[in-house]
Image (cartoon, rainbow, N blue to C red):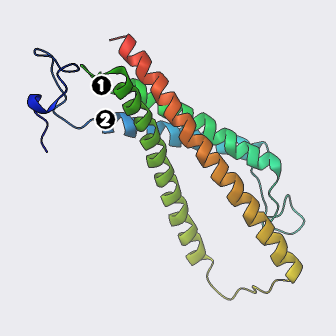
Amino acid sequence: MATTRATLDPALYPEGVDFPATSAVAWSAIWAGAATAIALTIILVAIGSGLGFMAASPWPGVGPKVTTFSIGAGIGLVIVQWLSSAVGGYIAGRLRTRWTGLHTHEAFFRDTAHGLITWAVATIVVVGVAVFISTLAGLAAAGPVDVSMTREAADEARKAAMTISLFTGVSMLVGAFVASVAAAIGGQLRDRHP
């Protein structure tokens, strides 16, 4: 159904007040927030890796093993998601155009949705790139590889994968929540300062 003045609540859109004729989603603000979140994620992961929080080595006896995933690395993952999502969400909320004639609850919802969408776009892009790079690395490494594994090593790998999955899921939930809240804060500030 098309939006016309007759279909809008007259209390929210009295005569003389413009109503939104376009989408309520400000994609340019979302893409700007997502790009910022991705860039900050890359920076924070590089710093975390340099400090040894997210480092693993496939070589025997050199650094932590691939199957080792520490609580520190998990906390680092949560912090990376928290900071990059907060900045990306805030940017998306702050850069969107001002909505006129909207109830404050609707503006709050839209800002929160912009933060969540920003987080989702950034996450999809990062995961897509990671899968692409992993696929290329797998193709480059294809060849005769001895993949025999002891039962003990397989159990250790399973436990590491479970821990990584748990921390990844928690960090993603934290990121989604923080991006939504940050966008709402950014949007409120945007509306206070035309």
Position in image of residue 158 (x %, y %): 77, 71
Position in image of residue 94 (x %, y %): 41, 24
Give the total number of marks visible in the rendering.
2
- Would you identify the image quadrant in which residue 140 lies? bottom right
The residue shown at (32%, 12%) is: 194
The first of marks 1 and 2 along the sequence is: 2
Q: Which residue is mark 1?
A: 97
Q: As drawn, which residue projects farthest toward the top?
A: 193
Q: CA distance from mark 1 to mark 2?
A: 7 Å
Labels 1 and 2 touching (C-beta < 8 A): yes
Q: Secondary structure at mark 1?
A: loop
The residue shown at (87%, 62%) is: 62
Amino acid at pointer 1: Thr
Q: Which residue is mark 2?
A: 26
Q: Secondary structure at mark 2?
A: loop
59 or 30: nearer the viewer: 30
Q: Quadrant of the N terminus?
A: top left
Q: Is residue 52 visible?
A: no
Above or below residue 1? Residue 166 is below
Above or below residue 94? Residue 27 is below
